[in-house]
């Protein structure tokens, strides 16, 4: 990858808010971006050079668009992609980010969990799998209560619930099956970790230089979905080093280049690996305001083999999500002016063409003198903006 000439042709598989910021970063260095997603006018399509609407779980559809554009790089932006097809493209000489194998390891929760917990011996929450309600009842008792039930194939908290007692298992099974993506009925049940704080460690793996890290980002989730994040996370140097060591181990095993969002639960005396995204992370959107190079620019530089001389956090910073409340295909935002009144506050509206309850439509960003101030500013701005 050394001394690649620009522009490169980059195909983004997934064109949501994270893809949109990545496309902007790629274009700022003159690259050609093709944005692909399951629906028209997705956020990244609005800023890309070309757009295609296909089912990314369909191998023939993927073949058609790759044939049409002949990209140099394929950059997955979501998990739900026919990953076997990505291996084929890789064998044909297209660079898949971070690697085709890594996308297949992280598509579902089970393979990455097996890699981390079994092959690499990393501490995770105690867990078990179930493929029927009866089996879930059985393994839930082993794991104990409360526990967390999730479809192995889902993201952003879909189908995920906390189960406090045996009476709640039936309900959790139904919810998980409803929320699962794809056709698998496999469920993971995890020990509930009563963490003090949870973090994402943005880990940048490079082709020809050592792995570098962003200062940890703390976040708060509801319904299994991110609500706000802030950086720095306020954890100790020892906790940070432990997380960095684990992130290096897992990302080295996955290989390739690009940014990874590695999630951890931090308890009084442990740093527990949870899961990772082999791409920019939603909680990492705070870096749009906090850092000299944001997570999207870092992803791009790592992919193209460009230098990353330093990663600097300018000031305590925070992000807070702007969510929709209902189904609509005519999206307007009110009170944007009120939200932007405070200095060092910004808003990104993603331009999603329709909404559903809890769909993330935008994000508020803020810098402050302290984390408390940055969080307060970001949350106040996010609360002001109304999706109507
Ligand atoms: N074992 C657990 N103990 C305690 N809390 C948990 C556990 N597993 C998940 N959670 C909570 O639910 C959130 C979402 O879980 P997880 O990251 O596994 O799901 P996800 O759907 O992949 O989310 P995303 O795709 O947004 O990263 C976590 O960030 C955490 O707040
Ligand atoms: N936790 C993963 C994540 O945040 N992914 C981001 O959300 C988009 C899907 O949003 P949608 O469901 O509103 O279409 C994805 O395309 C990606 O940008
Ligand atoms: Mg997660």
Image (cartoon, rainbow, N blue to C red):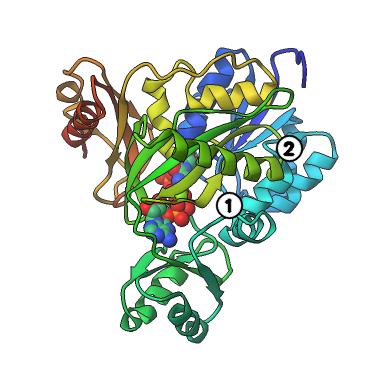
Give the quarter of the image for residue 236.
top left
Residue 108: x percent and y percent?
59, 58
Instruction: Name the foreground residue: 40 vs 36.
Output: 36
Mark 2 closeness class: few <14, some 14–19, many ≥20 residues within 10 Å: some
Q: Is residue 70 left or right of residue 281?
A: right
What residue did someone put label 2 on? Answer: 66
Question: Which mark is first along the chain, 1 or 2?
Answer: 2
Q: Residue furthest right?
A: 92
Mark 1 closeness class: few <14, some 14–19, many ≥20 residues within 10 Å: many
Residue 14 position (above or below residue 143): above
Residue 254 position (above or below residue 33): below
Residue at horizontal 20%, vertical 25%? Answer: 336
Q: Which dot marks residue 313?
A: none
Indicate which label's residue lies in the foreground, 2 or 1: 1
Instruction: Name the foreground residue: 216 vs 48.
Output: 216
What residue did someone put label 1 on? Answer: 80
Which quadrant holds the C terminus? top left
Instruction: Please tell me whether mark 1 sits on a helix, a strand or a loop.
Output: loop
Residue 288: x percent and y percent?
41, 23
Give the quarter of the image for residue 93.
top right
Residue at horizontal 67%, vertical 37%? Answer: 98
Q: CB at mark 1 closer than 8 A to ligand 2?
A: no
How far apart, in angstroms, are the residues tagged by discs 2 and 1?
A: 17 Å
Residue 148: x percent and y percent?
40, 66
Residue at horizontal 68%, vertical 32%? Answer: 257
């Amino acid at each position: 990858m050394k001394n690649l000439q620009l522009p490169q042709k980059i195909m983004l598989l997934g064109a949501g808010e994270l893809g949109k910021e990545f496309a902007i970063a790629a274009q700022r260095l003159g690259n050609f971006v093709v944005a692909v997603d399951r629906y028209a006018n997705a956020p990244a399509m609005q800023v890309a050079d070309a757009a295609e609407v296909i089912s990314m779980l369909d191998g023939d559809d993927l073949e058609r668009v790759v044939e049409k554009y002949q990209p140099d790089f394929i950059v997955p932006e979501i998990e739900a992609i026919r990953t076997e097809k990505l291996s084929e493209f890789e064998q044909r000489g297209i660079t898949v980010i971070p690697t085709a194998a890594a996308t297949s390891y992280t598509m579902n929760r089970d393979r990455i969990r097996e890699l981390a917990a079994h092959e690499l011996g990393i501490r995770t929450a105690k867990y078990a799998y179930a493929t029927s309600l009866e089996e879930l009842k059985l393994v839930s008792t082993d794991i104990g209560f409360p526990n967390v039930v999730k479809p192995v194939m889902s993201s952003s908290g879909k189908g995920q619930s906390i189960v406090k007692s045996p009476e709640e298992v039936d309900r959790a099974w139904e919810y998980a099956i409803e929320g699962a993506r794809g056709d698998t009925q496999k469920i993971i049940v995890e020990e509930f970790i009563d963490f003090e704080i949870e973090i994402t460690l943005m880990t940048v793996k490079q082709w020809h230089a050592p792995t570098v890290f962003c200062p940890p980002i703390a976040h708060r989730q509801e319904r299994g979905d991110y609500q706000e994040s802030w950086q720095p996370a306020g954890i100790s140097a020892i906790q940070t080093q432990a997380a960095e060591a684990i992130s290096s181990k897992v990302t080295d095993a996955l290989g390739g280049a690009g940014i990874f969002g590695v999630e951890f639960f931090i308890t009084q005396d442990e740093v527990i690996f949870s899961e990772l995204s082999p791409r920019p992370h939603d909680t990492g959107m705070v870096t749009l305001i906090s850092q000299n190079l944001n997570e999207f620019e870092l992803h791009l530089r790592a992919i193209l083999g460009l230098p990353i001389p330093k990663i600097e956090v300018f000031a305590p910073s925070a992000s807070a999500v702007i969510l929709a409340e209902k189904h609509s295909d005519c999206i307007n935002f009110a009170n944007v002016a009120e939200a932007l009144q405070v200095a060092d506050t910004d808003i990104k509206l993603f331009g999603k063409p329709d909404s559903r309850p809890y769909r993330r439509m935008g994000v508020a960003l803020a810098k402050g003198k302290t984390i408390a101030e940055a969080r307060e500013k970001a949350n106040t701005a996010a609360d002001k903006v109304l999706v109507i």
